[in-house]
Amino acid sequence: MARKRKAEPAAGQGELLDITAKLRTGPCVPALREAVKAWRAGGYRGITETTRVLLNYWFYTDHKLATGIPFRYHPSQQEAIETLIFVWESEKVRGRKALLERYAQDLRDLRLPPYDDFARYCIKMATGSGKTKVMALAVAWQFLNAARERDEIAKDYATTFLVLAPNVIVLERLKVDFASGRIFRVDPVIPRELGIFWEFDCVIRGEGKRRTPRARCSSPTSSSSTNAPTERPSRNPKP
């Protein structure tokens, strides 16, 4: 069942007392956060049809887990994946230099990167806030756009993903979610109408070779990262 979008809260005393943007953080974060908020309120302008289906399914549809427990992604998870989509798809930012020039509040003390040919994005989330779920959403967003959109659009999206863990403990936790693509089946990640495009496999370090699917998510080593596209190859209970 579809849910109505919540109206953005009006400016008031709460916002006047909010000092989040003034705290020490990344140079682009305050302006980027406000831009994403306005973009969301404006109806997600500049996205593909596939991405619109995904966003509506993830955040504006009621979900229940197999156990019958209501499920909803947390606001921090929504903001994280929305920011990735906004930067890549709506703003079409492909490098750190362009991101800094567009969103950094003060460039005077910043050093622009000398080598910026490979797009790199970072999501900073607290321990236990559900980063793995955001990783799954990012994988689905990239892959389904690559599989479903026209070639001139699809070429900008990835179909191969590498997940790295900082240590064996985290690797074992990731195995629970990604082994056999479990997280994509248990969580509401893939809308039913897009399931026909989902030909995806997850390979964990130490597993034998398998039939090569159209796309693959690998976890070969211990040290999380999703690759930016280069070329196109032939548990959250409701709060």
Image (cartoon, rainbow, N blue to C red):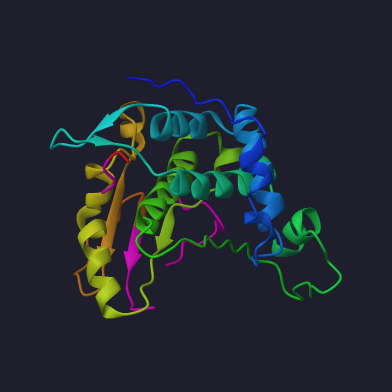
Coordinates of residue 12 in the picture (x, y in percent): 66, 35
**92 drawn magenta:** no
Q: Is residue 155 above or below residue 64?
A: below
**230 drawn magenta:** yes
Q: Is residue 69 left or right of residue 153?
A: left
**Residue at (65%, 42%) from the top-left corner?**
15
Coordinates of residue 35 in the picture (x, y in percent): 69, 43
Coordinates of residue 197 in the picture (x, y in percent): 36, 36
Place residue 173 in its image quadrant: bottom left
| Labels in figure, total | 0
Q: Give the extent of the magenta segment.
A: 217-237
Looking at this rendering, what residue extends furthest in the right direction? 108
Coordinates of residue 9 in the picture (x, y in percent): 59, 31
Is residue 153 among what the camera can see?
yes
Q: Is residue 103 left or right of residue 25?
A: right
Q: Is residue 142 left or right of residue 12?
A: left
Q: Nearer the viewer, residue 164 or 218?
A: 164
Q: Is residue 114 left or right of residue 159?
A: right
**Residue at (62%, 43%) from the top-left corner?**
86
Q: Is residue 79 above or below residue 67?
A: below
The N terminus lies in quadrant: top left
Q: Is residue 106 above or below residue 86?
A: below
Q: Nearer the viewer, residue 102 or 221?
A: 102
Looking at this rendering, what residue extends furthest in the left direction? 67
**Residue at (55%, 56%) from the top-left corner?**
229
Is residue 94 among what the camera can see?
no
Q: Is residue 112 above or below residue 145?
A: below
By secondary structure, the bulk of the magenta-drawn segment is best described as loop
The C terminus lies in quadrant: top left
